[in-house]
Image (tube, rainbow, N blue to C red):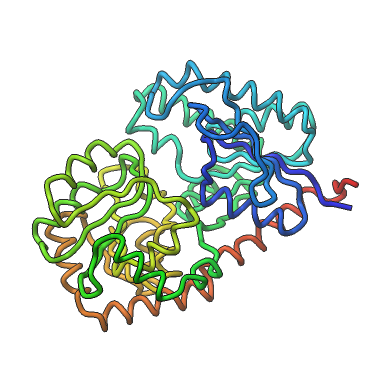
Amino acid sequence: MSRAHVVMLLSNAFRPDPRVKREADGLVQAGFRVTLICWDRAAELSSSELHDGIEVIRIQDVRSSHGLGWRQLFYLPRFLKSAIQLGESLRPMAVHCHDLDTLYAGYALKKKLGCPVIYDAHENYPELMKAYLPGLLVSGLRQLERRLSRKADLTITASTTLRDELISRGLRSVVTLGNYPCLSEFRAIDKARLMRAREELGVSPKTVLVAYVGGFSQNRALVPFIETAELLPNVEFHLWGDGHQRPQVEASVSQYRNARYHGWLPVDQLPLYFQAADIIYYGLRLDDASAAYNAPNTVAQAMASGKPVIATDIGDLGRMIRDTGCGILLDEATPGGIAAAVERLSSPELRETMGSRGLASAVSKYNAEMVQKRLVAHYEQLTAGGSES
């Protein structure tokens, strides 16, 4: 006997996405069958594969790219149509929709199959899209979310700020499951491997390395972070990631000898490079309304690494750091403010103190193992009586 079949919907190619993978892994480990239907817009990866027990099917006949703004409306409906057709053929016991751009497909499958729908709101999607879409379309997204979210049997947020807002709108079944890492993956990295990683980066053991690892969406304060390199010429500033700000990041790092951009970091390399750094930076632009809803998985990864964090004081980001004492909060992400925080953390003793606080909090609360148990419990409730032979 096996437990119920879950179909997850995702509008990117799954390389894999850390949050999606942690949730899928938790369900697979609990005995659920998980099929992930995702959108490989440029047909860059295999059309199907088995990834750590997760069945991955990539829709590749709807060609598009990221960063198209309103022009994505020409392509997204075709992806959703294909996802609905695939989902219907699989006849799952539950559909898990990652972000608003897949929720319509989940709603359609619920109507066709009578299965429960889980809405996984990674962020406040309409607010995030304000940086990329005209105001009329953003208003349309808000109305779409209000209508479709009421059809979900369970809504999951990564942010307590977003959870509270959704509850204030009248949604009942809303829970927060944070973007927290698997501690075992961080414990598996030995000191010799960390030393080799720093050597490969060209950073000596005595040089302070400040790292940013994450997406390059418009709400991230990345250029001020890079410009801090001019104020602290003996400190290294390195970035891993990709997204809309990549051209600005590449142009900025080229101006400073102590700033470097390394491209996208595969998820299995995250524990290594988080621990190879001395300080983790995670700054958000306070003039971007979506920043308050940001789910700071980078902070949780820094905690698991035992590394202190420099971050802006907003939403869950500020709450987590204030509650744990694992870093320094900035009123605003400016080169001067970032430099002052780095100088404070030039003390190995202070770095060790803050890093230890973060690690203790990761062990007691901010870890994937605890989140996975909660997710499985919700699924057991939703799919009770739906196991298959």
Q: Residue 200: image x %, image y %?
A: 31, 61
Which residue is depicted at the point 80% across and 47% down? 4
**83 in relation to 192, above or below:** above
Left or right: 243 as drawn, with respect to 92: left
- Residue placed at 31% from the left, 70% from the top? 327
Q: Where is residue 197 drawn, in percent x and y?
A: 35, 64
Most extreme residue toward the top, as rendered? Answer: 74
Query: Residue sitting at 49 percent across and 71 percent down?
Result: 362
Q: In this view, does 57 lie above or below 122?
A: above
Position of 45 with respect to 388 (left or right) is left
In this view, 376 is above or below 61: below
Across and down, in percent, residue 182 comes to 55, 64
Q: Which residue lies furthest to the bottom in this view?
A: 349
Q: How many marks?
A: 0
User: 327 or 273, which lies in front?
Assistant: 273
Residue drawn at (67%, 63%) of the image? 373
Front-lying residue, 233 or 380: 233
Q: Position of residue 215 (x, y in %)?
A: 37, 46
